[in-house]
Image (tube, helix red, strand yellow):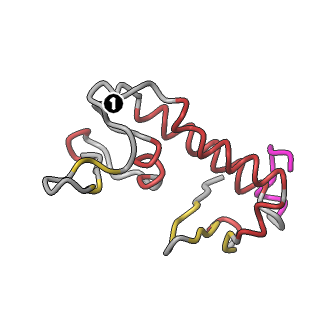
Amino acid sequence: MNSTLTGRSGSFACASVSAGVAPGHLAHPPFAAALRALLALKEELAPGSEGLFGAFRPAPDGGEAPRRIDYPALGRPRSAHDEILLCAGADPRSGNDLDALEAEVVSRLDAAVAAFPGAPPAARRGHPG
């Protein structure tokens, strides 16, 4: 399954089930647990070898600036899950394997989509919920 969970103005949408994620959906324990597992990925990563962790880096003015993964330097296209990878702390200099992290994001995202209240049977295949 190719799942996407995309942020839009502070809200989320599960493209695979063509539905927005509202706060009430978090009352569904299987979905809340799957989403929690996706977000917990950040806590499970190896510490960054250069202190890289999260989607932002220090800006020259002392604020925060968005961090980017230099996909062309890696010889690969931008990941469809780039925003989630950045928030989790993915960076070639972080000490975490980008390909392995991307595979784990996809696995956990698929589980969240499968547990989404009202997800079609095809989305639930292989996932309880």
In the image, the segment drawn in magenta is: 120-129
Most foreground residue, 121 or 62? 62
In the rendered image, residue 65, in percent from the top left (x then y), is placed at 25, 56
Q: Verify whether residue 124 appears in magenta.
A: yes
How many callouts does the rendering have?
1
> Image height check: is 27 above or below 62?
below
Main secondary structure found in the magenta portion: loop
> Image height check: is 116 above or below 22?
above
Three-letter amino acid code at disc 1?
Ser
Is residue 13 rendered to the left or right of residue 72?
A: right
x 28%, y 50%: residue: 67
In this view, which residue lies farthest toward the front? 62
In the rendered image, residue 48, in percent from the top left (x then y), is placed at 35, 28
Is residue 77 rendered to the left or right of residue 40?
A: left
Residue at image mark 1 = 94
> Image height check: is 10 above or below 67?
below
x 37%, y 38%: residue: 53
- Displayed quadrant of residue 2: bottom right
x 29%, y 46%: residue: 69
| Element at label 1 | loop
Most foreground residue, 52 or 92? 52
Is residue 86 rendered to the left or right of residue 123?
A: left
In the rendered image, residue 29, in percent from the top left (x then y), is placed at 84, 52
In the rendered image, residue 40, in percent from the top left (x then y), is placed at 60, 40
